[in-house]
Structure formats: structure tokens, C-alpha cells
Amino acid sequence: MNRLLILSVSAGAGHTRAAQALEQTGKALWPKAEILHADVLDFAEPIYRKGYVQSYLEMVNRAPELWGYLYRSSDHPPRSGRQSRFVRVFDRLEFARFRRFVRDFDADAVLATHFLPGQVFAPYRRRARDRFPLGIVLTDFDAHAFWVQPTADRFFVATEELAAVLAGRGIPRQKISVTGIPVLPAFARRHDRKALRARFKLSRRKPVILVMSGGAGVGSLVEVVRRVLASGSVQVLAVAGRNEKARRELESLRPRPGSELRVFGFVEDVSALMAVANLAVGKSGGLTTAECLAMGLPMLVCDPIPGQEERNCDFLLEAGAAVRANGGAALSFKLTALLSDERRLKSMRRSAVRAGKPRAAAEILKVAGSAEMRG
């Protein structure tokens, strides 16, 4: 591999984290190669970029049921006709600079952690143009129709079930590699839990609960932390991401006697927090789910957003690595029950280890650097 281009879209933090995982792993694997990670939306007009990102974040925060409806109603093969022609014309104008950038980079392989690059190049690839090796890396434990891009050369998926789903939607099975979702190398290395507990000033006698809301800080994080702090004698690590308002609110909380609270904003090395935790509480985003599994960390999933988060949660429940709580009262009840059942927590941890694929990024790059990439 001499030149590798990795493409992401900053609509939610997961697509970017997956691309960063591929970038870091690729640079370690091929130190002399030119490896570049680019955000597709950096080439779009500011109003388009802002609308693309903010519309998603606002919807999942303020109208999750509407997002779920749109997710389900759009989960079908694309129809031909007037709408698709309109989209093609719009994409041709909006993404012209992005297409030139990709062509000029002249990569040996292109990996996309979002379906948008596949959509943008599909009309040209159907006409036998832009035939660079293109791989699509799915970042959820679900395969929405938007990811079904027949002109791509290879698809990288989390599970055998997703391979079957894509094959059922017309993607040749030989073009699909079951690798897992790429996570940063930090999630694959061994951690010194004793040293990390000392670093975070954590007691070994109390359970450590990691509460997260994702890199963008969406969801009812403060209310969840309140519930966790009220569940007993616990040590809570709360990650607000880039949500400064939530971080300030968390810092104003006063834990009950016997409980402790550490508040973090955006955290670069989440693996260190996961290494010391007994349980993660939060949403089931694709990358968060993959990272917890890679670390062997059980999850208590709170009110997953309808759509991909619910389907990620389904996977966790089937794997035995999580429980789900719908609503605050259920969260309090299930958390208390889990913390009093050490045998069940250990079983969930073993299940997480079995389901985790911490070296997924290396597996993807191994295929990307081989003749398999073109199917």
C-alpha cells in the first residue's frame, strides 16, 4: 500500500472515530505509505455542511421518534425516477470539489466510513469512471438501505448476520468481509487497571460506573447521572463530550454520601475510562458499542434512539453483553439489580469479550491492501 484515502462524514462522532481508527492502524502497519483522512463535508458549502450535521443532532435530541420513523421509512431499495435524477444533479454540483480531490489523490484504495462517498461516486462508477478500489465500512450492527451501494468493490461489516442482510439486498457475498467495526488501537491493548484506578483516585471497594453520551453529548446525560448516583455507593465517571452545558450541570451535582462523581468533557482516551469501569451506562451508538465490546465492558443501554441505536441494542441483548432500560425508573431498578448480582455482571463481561473485535481495523486494512479489495 502506497496511498490510502480514508473518508468520513462528521454527522455524529462515530463515523469520524472509525476513520481515525483506520488511519492510526494504517500508519502503524504501513509507516512509509501516504495515508490521508478527509471529511467529505469539508468540501461542501458551509450551509450544506451545517444543515447535514445539525439536522441529525437536533432530530435525535428533540424528536427521536421522528428520526426513527424516517430511518425505518427510508430503509428500502432506492427508487428510480424524478427524485433520484434531482439528487444526482444536486450532488454533481455540491460535491464537484470533493470528487476532484479524490481523483487527484489517486489512491491505491479508498475506504469510506459513511455511505455518502458511495452515493456521490455511484453515477460515475456505473459509467465505468472513477474505478479506484472503494470499500464501505459499516459503523453500526445494522445495514440500512443507504449503505447498500452496489458500485462499491467491498463491504466491511460487524457480523455474519449483516453479511447475510447485505447479500439479501443484492450485494454479492464474495464482496463482503466480516471484520467488525474499526476501533482505535488503544482498545486492543492491555491496560494496567490498578495504575489507572490510582490515576483516577478510585477505590477498589466500590463499583465504577461509566456514563457516556457520545462525542456530541446528545441525550439526557444529566438525568441519567442523577439516577446512577442515587443507586447506591458508586463511583461515577461522567463524560459530557463536547456538550459544555451538560458538563457544567454535571459539575454542579452533589452526590449522596458514599457516592463519588468525576466529570469529563471530550475525552481522547476513552479506553482508559472503560478499563477501570465495571459497567457502562448510556446510548448504543455503533462505535460506543464496538468500543465497549472490545474492552469487554458490559452495558446498560438507556432509551436507545429509534433506528440504528435500537438495532445496535438488539445485537447487544442477543449477545448477552447488555441490558436495556426504558425510562428513568427502569434504569434505577435495573442498575440496582445488576450491581447486586456480581455473577451476572461477570457473565455479561465474558459475553462482551466473545462479541468484541478489537483488531477490526487491522483486518479491514489487510483486505484493503490485497487483491480481495476488487472482489
Image (tube, grey):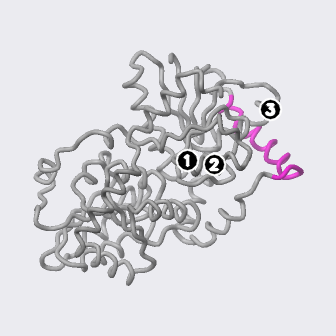
Which label's residue is closer to the chain start, 2 or 3? 3
- The amino acid type found where label 1 is placed reads Glu
Q: Tell me the kind of residue under disc 2.
A: Ala
- Disc 1 to disc 3, C-alpha distance: 28 Å
- Image position, residue 90 (x, y; %): 78, 44
Please tell me whether residue 236 is drawn above or below residue 297 in the rendered image. Answer: below
Residue 122, image x, y percentages: 74, 36
Tell me the residue that label 2 is attached to: 164
Which region is colored magenta? Answer: 79-99
Q: Callout 2: helix, strand or loop?
A: helix
- The residue lying at 48 percent from left, 27 percent from top is 366
- For the residues labelled 2 and 3, the Cα–Cα distance comes to 24 Å
Q: Quadrant of residue 65?
A: bottom right
Residue annotated with mark 1: 160
Q: Earlier in the sequence, mark 1 or mark 3?
A: 3
Cβ atoms under marks 2 and 1 closer than 8 Å: yes
For residue 126, the mark is 3
Kindly report which numbered mark, 1 or 3, lies closer to the viewer in this rendering. 1
Q: Amino acid at mark 3?
A: Arg
